[in-house]
Image (cartoon, rainbow, N blue to C red):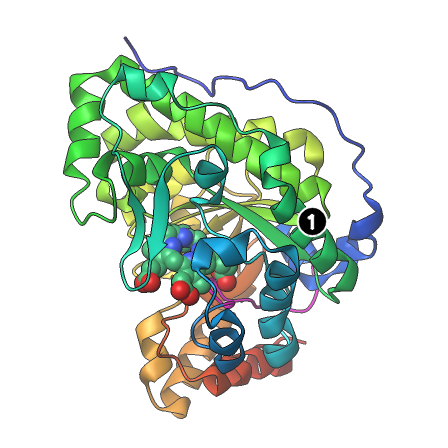
Amino acid sequence: MSAPSSAPSIAVSGLPQEHPLRHGAASSPLLLAATGQPGPRPVWFMRQAGRSLPEYRRIREGTGMLQACFDPSLVAEITLQPVRRHGVDAAILFSDIVVPLKAMGVDLDIVAGVGPVVAAPFRSRSDLERLPNLDPASVAAVSEGARLVATASPVPLIGFAGAPFTLASYLIEGGPSRTHARTKALMHSDPELWHDLADRLARVAAEFLRVQVLAGASAVQLFDSWAGSLSLADYRRFVLPHSAAVFAAIGDLGVPRIHFGVGTGELLGAMGEPDVEVVGVDYRVDLADAAARVRPGRALQGNLDPALLQADLPVIRSHVERILRQGDNLHGHIFNLGHGVPPETDPDVLTRIVSWVHELRP
Ligand code: CP3
């Protein structure tokens, strides 16, 4: 079977663009930057809600990660912790990319220090037949959590989902993988099964994003964290059409869409091709170089190396200044890290970075 040359379309229901819980969001720095309009420079951090915060570790005591993800008041509280502490310009929903899979009945857990572990890894067409579509009712706790955040948050809420490739990698490998060898083997040996699986996961991601936006999220990010392990040719043939289908399926919602992956230097141009407003850039590529690779009219998000959070404050500040200067020349710039906040980060350093960004680009 040949790969679809354009995004396969996923039918979705319509939605009014105005949402009662998104009032005021249109003039927020995040949404202005995402759509290339002038305004103060927004800053938020991937994985800002989590283990770098003592208040997170306290509230999570005795509660499993997935259990927490299905508890609306915990979801809301943990999502808002970094907003209160750091004064970031966006909240990102406390959840995980495997939450919709769990809600669909996939037997998996999130193991501390390891990541998602799937009991019976995906191997064959019969496994696909056992994978249902995502029923919004099964993630009612997530949408209730999002609604609580959207009601209480002073800043826009970002919803997110795992992209088809990254989700497929967890399903096929059974857990985190450095090589993604089984996933790549399946793609190349049984392209038809691969495309059917990726199509199913694209529908799951689109539905999960839709649920969050309907509950009040003002922007969404698709995490294709492990896409950087693919060659550009494989990415274009096996992955991009399915990620593009996710973005196309939620286009009617009228919220900015962010496309992010790690180690994606070679893929950046391709990642900017679908219907997205923002491309996330990891720390390996200079924002100026990234801008030359991504088609014009896209904002960029990034890209402080998370490892630098361990450096001395003057060193960090000089890198923040460099990234802000590079951001000045972009169609829009959202300050972020190049990947998630490491658990050992001193939270005061993050608060400092937020105040520097706000002070230098008010
Ligand atoms: O960014 C945020 O603050 C929102 C929360 C968020 C989590 N996971 C919470 C979480 C987000 C956006 C994610 C997405 C996610 N999950 C991705 C894509 C982002 C990325 O990092 O590239 C991926 C690949 C996963 C899968 C996953 N879940 C991993 C690799 C881990 C870490 C495992 C570990 O313990 O080192 C998780 C667990 C997880 N997700 C934690 C949190 C706060 C830690 C669990 C805990 O606190 O016990």
Kindly state the secondary structure of the residue where label 1 is placed: helix
Stretch in magenta? 37-49
The x and y percentages for residue 261 are 37, 48
- At label 1, the amino acid type is Glu
Predominant secondary structure in magenta? loop
Q: Quadrant of the N terminus?
A: top left
Q: Tell me where residue 13 sits by quadrant.
A: top right
The x and y percentages for residue 83 are 63, 72
Instruction: Decide if residue 275 is in sight here.
Output: no
The x and y percentages for residue 217 are 68, 49
Residue 8 drawn above or below residue 343:
above
Q: Quadrant of the C terminus?
A: bottom right
Q: Residue at x 73, y 57 (%)?
A: 148
Residue 181 lies in the magenta stretch: no
Say which of 3 and 82 sits in front: 82
- Viewed as shown, does residue 345 lie left or right of 55? left
Residue 39 lies in the magenta stretch: yes
The x and y percentages for residue 55 are 54, 79
Label 1 lies in ligand 1 vicinity (Cβ under 8 Å): no
Residue 358 drawn above or below residue 237:
below
Residue 132 drawn above or below residue 323:
above
Name the residue carrying label 1.
Answer: 144
Say which of 28 and 349 sits in front: 349
Instruction: Decide if residue 165 is in sight here.
Output: yes
